[in-house]
Image (cartoon, helix red, strand yellow):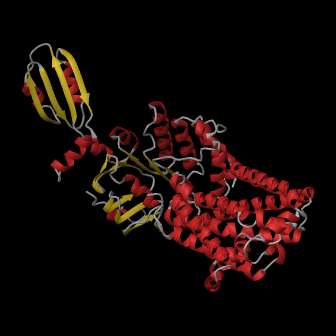
Amino acid sequence: MREERRSLIGWVAGLLGFCVIMLSMYPTIRGNSGFAKLLDAYPEPLKKLFNLADYTTGAGYLRTEVFSFMAPLLIAIFAIIWGSDLIAGEEERRTIDLLLANPVTRRRMVIEKWLALLTGTVLLSASLELTLGLLGPAFKLHVGWGPLTAVVLGSGLFALAFGTLALAVGAATGSRAVARGVATMLAVATYLLSTLAQIVTWLRPVQPASLWYHALGTDPLSSGFHAGHLSILVLTTIVIVALAALGFERRDLAT
Amino acid sequence: MTGDTLDRSEGATIFLDHVTKHYRSGGGVDDLTLSVGPGEVFGFLGPNGAGKTTVIRLILDLIRPDSGSIRVFGRDSRRDSVEIRRRLGYVPGELALYDRFTAREVLTHFAHLRGGLEWSKIATPAEQMQLDLDRPLRTMSKGNRQKVGLVAAFMGDPELLLLDEPTSGLDPLVQQQVHGEVRRAAAEGRTVFLSSHVLAEVGEVADRVGLIRNGRIIAVERVTELQHRALHQVDATFSSPEDESTFRSLPGVSTCTLTDHVLHLEVSGSLRPIVERLAATELTDLSIREPTLEELFLSFYEQPNA
């Protein structure tokens, strides 16, 4: 955990900066009827694709500018980079020899590394929520803590799931590059699947296969918590942790 | 050559039973059987890439054998790996440390993973090796980094020490310190498994030596026997004529040539008779060279039953 303290601070600062920029642009858009008319003229599929609904209200603005993909993606990239490094990085830097000379099972190592990832993701998500919740009113943007928590939770769980996937692929292959590639590809695929399914009817039946759909596709900023959808994310993550432990258990390390 | 392994498997600290491990990229070990007794300092001698590190990493369960089994403290290396690792210390051949931290931070973390060792267990070996604990590891010299690895291995007084080329790349002063630590551990009754590609090093600290090449054990011998077998090359130049036969008849001389006041001998065992005979000559130049590892291995191939 402490190993990544500096990089976590960097990520928090970056996310904070992004939020402040987004927030500072809101007053020029809020209640701007010109914008509302412009958006109304957009074709319906485009609005759905880019989540353009209610752009001029606080919730709509946040949904479009912050949570349509930017913020969840930033947290997910953080989680994937870190997740891929937690075990595969120890192997590539060869520190794993010294670490596993200690009386520690590989399973315990996977779980403790995952707990570090969880802590980092929670800290990053919490700083996102606090930034938007505390600074929002200064820019006349009020969405309330409830909806904000719902959407941040969805984003955080999405990021955690793919960070965990990166950790698992890293544990099973020993390669950070493979871990990052696989996790990033699947994260993007799941985002595209969920978003495209809103406009492409024949994709609708497979939409539940997308983790993005369960995290953010239900519009938690307006509709609040969805225990069912969130528990799918949590369960998937737990299964991936178990698979990571299994995959790591069977391997020859750092050969 | 490994005839004593069967007798030693009972109560052995390390016992490898027909272990084979191949890598996709080549290398590894082949049908390797080896036994190290409690309290023994076992030298594992072979050129780079012979399979020394493979054996040590198999013992640690970092890699798994394709076939054969390994017992450490009489326990299965795979099933009881955590219990085994609780009782051993390890210095990797390619020591990689957490460079962003100080030695104190890394060692404290490992002490925690070892079930919360008291700080004195770290401080004592660190003091003995004169290690500065509070410098970031990335700013440390190779010698000091190696000391951190040694403290990590020695803390908690483990029963078994696995040292993979612990002195390679170190200056002679630090090498001597490392040898001192190994001898101290041996004096306290610990078992030491030390790999090396330097004959002199193994000769200095080990009781028994296993010679490995291309993944196979060539021989396991007591150090004294190995030194007996090791042929010293003696070259001497005289200012007055000498009689070749007086050298040829000395004990341990296997090859003897004398031309133009220049003598060449190959000698096994004690050098004393040679030195005494040479003392009686008009000597202008003398060199005595230890055999290289390659020559030592060759001696086993040339006389397989000697």
**In this figure, what is the number of numbered marks?**
0
Q: Kindly indicate the quadrant of the structure image that contains residue B136.
A: top right
Residue A118 or residue A209, whichever sits in front: A209
Relative to B171, say whether B208 is above or below.
below
Left or right: B32 in relation to A13: left
Q: Is residue B20 positioned above or below B238 on the image?
A: below
Residue at the spot 33% in from the left edge and 57% down from the top edge? B27
From the viewer's perspective, is residue B131 above or below residue B277?
A: below
The answer to whether residue A66 shows anywhere in this view is no
> Which x, y percent locates residue B275?
23, 25
Q: Position of residue B147 (x, y in %)?
A: 54, 40
Q: Is residue B268 left or right of residue B195?
A: left
Q: Is residue A84 left or right of residue A132?
A: left
Q: Quadrant of residue B138?
A: top right
| x 27%, y 45%: residue | B225
Q: Quadrant of residue A157?
A: bottom right
Q: Position of residue B112 (x, y in %)?
A: 67, 55
Residue A39 visible at all: yes
A37 relative to B302 in the view: left or right: right
- Image quadrant for the N terminus of chain B? bottom left
- Measured as percent of width and height from the top left, residue B245 is found at 7, 27
Depth check, front residue: A185 or B50: A185
